């Protein structure tokens, strides 16, 4: 099985959890793309849902597939949000997200969801956040150098994200992303709070204790992870 096969399998599993008449948060990234594909297939077969996407990319895919796209202007509660992740801490389900650049909308959608479900292949499971990838931090363009210095003071090595053409990467909200490489992170909730307290930080890619469940595809099928201590 290829990695895409695993992503497809786990996406289909999550799509099967979506119920008729609900509001669904659509994640961003390759795994979420497969999830949206599955939802389009279900909607074509009669499933009636309204969707709030976490990026312009996902919104485009949803609309092109005939899904009903709504916004927080009319729908402020999401029944279920499904999204990928860059790292999943296997005991707590704390997450790193945002390598795809959509972390702010992803966190808003996850925070408004009654159920937030993460889908991934098993390569994303880690013992410590920060072991596979940097933590993306969305920052204002104004004064980003100051914010960068503040993040460096917290022990991170910083790279400002760039496009393939070498221009500064801009999020859907028009902000920069600083990719902050920390030593393995013992306490994601505290680090998230510390970073968010700097005025130039818009949001971080640390998602502590937000996921109800992770569906993780591996060679032996799809495993369900729940955070220890989750009600
Ligand atoms: C985008 C994200 C994605 O969920 C994350 O990058 C995982 O993407 P993929 O499924 O392509 O590995 O956080 O901002």
Image (cartoon, helix red, strand yellow):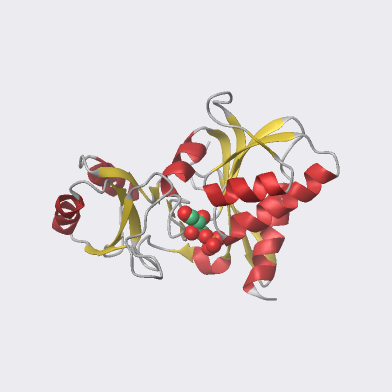
- Whether 45 is drawn above or below 128: the answer is above
**Residue 59 seen from this side:** yes
Residue 168 lies in quadrant: bottom left
- Whether 229 is drawn above or below 89: the answer is above
The residue sitting at the bottom extreme is 1
Q: Who's the residue at 34% across and 69% down the image? A: 166
The residue sitting at the top extreme is 74
> Relative to residue 97, is residue 34 drawn left or right?
right
Residue 205 locus on image (x, y percent): 38, 51
The quarter of the picture where the N terminus appears is: bottom right
Residue 134 locus on image (x, y percent): 34, 63
Front residue of 150 and 71: 71
Number of on-image labels:
0
Q: Who's the residue at 35% across and 56% down the image? A: 136
**Residue 85 seen from this side:** no
> Relative to residue 163, is residue 2 drawn left or right?
right
Residue 164 locus on image (x, y percent): 41, 70
Residue 146 locus on image (x, y percent): 14, 51
Residue 167 lies in quadrant: bottom left
Q: Who's the residue at 55% across and 34% down the image? A: 113
> Relative to residue 210, is residue 36 drawn left or right?
right
The residue sitting at the right extreme is 45
């Amino acid at each position: 099985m290829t990695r895409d096969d695993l992503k497809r399998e786990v996406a289909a599993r999550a799509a099967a959890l979506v119920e008729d008449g609900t509001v669904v948060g659509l994640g961003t990234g390759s795994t979420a793309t497969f999830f949206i594909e599955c939802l389009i297939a279900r909607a074509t077969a009669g499933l009636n849902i309204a969707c709030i996407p976490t990026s312009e990319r996902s919104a485009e895919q949803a609309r092109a597939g005939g899904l009903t796209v709504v916004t927080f202007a009319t729908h402020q509660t999401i029944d279920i949000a499904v999204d990928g992740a860059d790292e999943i801490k296997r005991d707590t389900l704390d997450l790193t997200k945002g390598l795809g650049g959509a972390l702010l909308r992803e966190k808003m959608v996850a925070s408004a969801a009654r159920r937030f479900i993460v889908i991934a292949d098993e390569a994303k499971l880690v013992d410590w956040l920060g072991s596979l990838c940097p933590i993306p931090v969305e920052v204002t363009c104004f004064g980003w150098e100051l914010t960068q210095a503040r993040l460096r003071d917290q022990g991170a090595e910083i790279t400002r994200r760039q496009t393939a053409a070498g221009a500064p990467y801009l999020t859907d909200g028009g902000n920069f992303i600083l990719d902050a490489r920390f030593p393995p992170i013992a306490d994601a909730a505290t680090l998230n709070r510390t970073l968010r307290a700097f005025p130039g930080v818009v949001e971080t890619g640390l998602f502590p204790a937000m996921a109800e469940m992770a569906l993780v595809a591996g060679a032996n099928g799809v495993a369900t992870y729940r955070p220890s201590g989750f009600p």
